[in-house]
Image: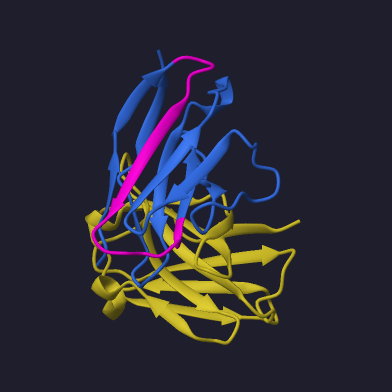
Amino acid sequence: QITLRESGPTLVKPRQTLTLTCTFSGFSLSTSGVGVGWLRQPPGKPLEWLALVYWTGDKRYRPSLQSRLTITADTSEDQVVLTMTDMDPLDTATYFCAHSFGTGNFDDWGQGTLITVSS
Amino acid sequence: DILMTQSPSSLSASVGDRVTITCRATRSVPMYVNWYQQKPGRAPKLLIYDGISLPTGVPSRFTGSDSGTDFTLTISSLQPEDFATYYCQQSYTIPFTFGGGTRVEIK
């Protein structure tokens, strides 16, 4: 059974750096075809994909946010970390990590964590 | 970026109704469209992947179809647990993009 869980602060100040950790179980990020992605959803708005790390170590980012995002995988700890710099109130959203296999769909999700950006 | 335009943005339906939701891509995304169901306060759930495939455990009343740029999600007989918001997603090219969502409400 695949599980994922997001952890990190719930409140960050503008211009600070957000660090979120996704701790997963039930799969290995070393398995061919596997990826772990980060997505977010502002309150009452649609989903937005942010970043994805593949089993090969390759990383993909949303181009409009690429300068602010870093995704790293720790396969020994079964964790994927997302950092997002220069946080703004518009970045207030629920952040999800999710398992991906094959063609970029997300078949298992964490419960999400609401991040509020406010001074 | 590929824009996914989803319609309708909301609909009211009764239990037992057939419901169809459409997603149109601004350019061809051959079969790389996925559909998700999301209930309030919950994470999305994958319903359809690669245009037409059902993950294990998803009821067969959910079907997907595609025609290159136009994709549909059909619920053949709406059940009480199907009242939720539905999103399409293209995974053909980076950045992966989602539709605006369709909220299915009880009539």
In the image, the chain rendered in yellow is: A
- Residue at screen point 62% across, 76% down: A33
Please state the extent of the stretch shown in magenta in the rendering. Answer: B14-33
Chain B: drawing colour? blue
Question: Is residue B22 one of those drawn in magenta?
Answer: yes
Residue A5 lies, in percent from the top left, at: 60, 57
- Compared to residue A68, the image places residue A57 above or below, namely below
Is B40 situated above or below B4? above
Q: Residue at x 51, y 59 (%)?
A: B50
The rendered magenta stretch, by its main secondary structure, is classed as loop
List the single residue furthest toward the front: B67
Considering depth in this image, is A44 or A31 the residue closer to the camera?
A31
Whole-percent x and y of residue B30? 41, 65
Closest to the observer, B103 or B58: B58
- Asked where in the image residue B68 lies, by quadrant, the reply is bottom left
Q: Is residue A115 among what the camera can see?
A: no
